[in-house]
Image: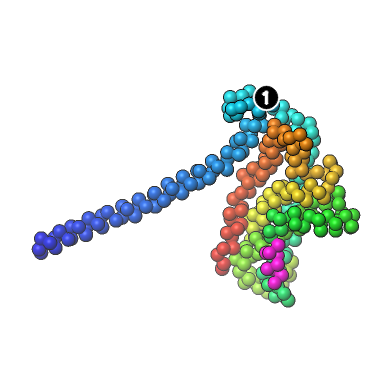
């Protein structure tokens, strides 16, 4: 073997030793970059929360000091005391009742609707489902329907009642719940239905004993999103009811934005109290959003 051949073989062997190490290094660098980006995103999302928490613990003189103080102040609970004395906990209770009723009614309607859209063939099936999907943004743009809804509810005598807001919330959140649950049902084999029908089961029995247990992740994901969407709704809740006893939490927070300016202490204190149920919900059920939304991604 010539000297050039030996040199070429050595260089090739050297490259074979270097390339695997580079292949191992590239995923490591990519992982570090992704971790850094997620850390930055987490910090940017937590900054408003930390600022609001610190502001809610400041006395009024500390709120307007210049330059602003971050940690150099004497914490006080006077803002929380004022918020609680204003009846804010009653507004939280009303919002919880509204949201629970909305979640139960939305899921009770969405599951059979999604089952019908996925398992049965009927006239205008596809256009109707496309209409439902197109209605999902209504939960975000509820202001566009505020005046028609108010006129209809007033004519029917349905305003300013305990069921007014759950009806509105359910109508807004139902399309999203149907869409999420149908995606999961598409991944449940239809052979299970056929086997159950062969054994004498009815469609209601299939829905109860087969579809319901297998679609629990999707029901959990839809329930969490329906709860959050109903809890954060402001436009309809500020117009459709005007009784203080029926007022939910979002208009109650807005009450601390007075005619002569914002009351930053009580405003941030009420906002901190308002996010507690959301944090608890995501801490306990947040994993259901990922599992429920990806359950139907692989069919079979």
Q: In this view, does 86 lie to the left or right of 15?
A: right
Residue 212 showing in the rendered view: no
In the picture shown, does residue 288 fall above or below 252? Answer: below
Q: Residues within 10 Å of mark 1 (few under 14, many from 20)?
A: few
- Secondary structure beneath dot 1 equals helix
Q: How many numbered callouts?
A: 1
Residue 60 showing in the rendered view: yes
Is residue 203 shown in magenta? no
Residue 100 horizontal/vertical position (percent) = 75, 49
In the picture shown, does residue 95 fall above or below 259? Answer: below
Q: Which residue is drawn at 73% across and 35% down?
A: 261
Q: Name the residue under label 1.
A: 61
Residue 275 horizontal/vertical position (percent) = 67, 41
Residue 37 horizontal/vertical position (percent) = 48, 47
Q: Which residue is drawn at 76% across and 49% down?
A: 235
Q: Which residue is drawn at 78% across and 55% down?
A: 146
Report the magenta residues as a range. 127-135
User: In the depicted view, which residue is nearer to us: 193 or 147?
Assistant: 147
Residue 122 horizontal/vertical position (percent) = 72, 75
Q: Quadrant of residue 129?
A: bottom right
Q: Quadrant of residue 5?
A: bottom left
The quarter of the rendered structure image containing the N terminus is bottom left
Task: Give the colour scheme shown.
Answer: rainbow
The quarter of the rendered structure image containing the C terminus is bottom right
Q: In this view, does 251 lie to the left or right of 195?
A: right
């Amino acid at each position: 073997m010539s000297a050039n051949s030996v040199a070429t073989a050595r260089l090739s062997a050297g490259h074979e030793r270097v390339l695997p190490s580079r292949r191992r290094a590239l995923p490591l660098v990519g992982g570090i970059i992704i971790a850094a980006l997620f850390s930055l995103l987490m910090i940017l999302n937590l900054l408003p929360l930390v600022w609001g928490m610190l502001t809610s613990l400041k006395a009024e003189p500390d709120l307007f000091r210049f330059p602003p103080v971050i940690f150099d102040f004497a914490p006080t609970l006077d803002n929380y005391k004022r918020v609680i004395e204003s009846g804010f906990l009653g507004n939280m209770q009303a919002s919880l009742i509204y949201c629970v009723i909305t979640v139960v009614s939305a899921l009770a309607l969405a599951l059979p609707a999604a089952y019908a859209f996925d398992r049965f063939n009927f006239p205008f099936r596809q256009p109707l489902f496309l209409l439902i999907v197109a209605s999902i943004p209504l939960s975000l743009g509820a202001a566009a329907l505020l005046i028609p809804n108010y006129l209809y509810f007033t004519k029917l005598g349905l305003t300013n009642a305990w069921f007014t807001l759950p009806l509105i919330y359910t109508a807004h959140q139902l399309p999203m719940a149907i869409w999420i649950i149908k995606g999961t049902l598409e991944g449940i084999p239809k052979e299970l239905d056929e086997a159950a029908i062969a054994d004498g089961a009815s469609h209601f029995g299939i829905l109860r004993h087969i579809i319901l247990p297998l679609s629990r992740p999707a029901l959990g994901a839809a329930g969490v999103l329906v709860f959050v969407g109903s809890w954060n709704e402001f436009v309809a809740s500020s117009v459709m009811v005007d009784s203080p006893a029926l007022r939910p939490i979002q208009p109650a927070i807005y009450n601390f934005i007075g005619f002569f300016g914002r009351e930053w202490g009580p405003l941030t204190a009420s906002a901190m109290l308002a996010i507690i149920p959301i944090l608890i919900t995501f801490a306990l059920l947040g994993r259901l959003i990922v599992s429920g939304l990806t359950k139907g991604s692989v069919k079979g």
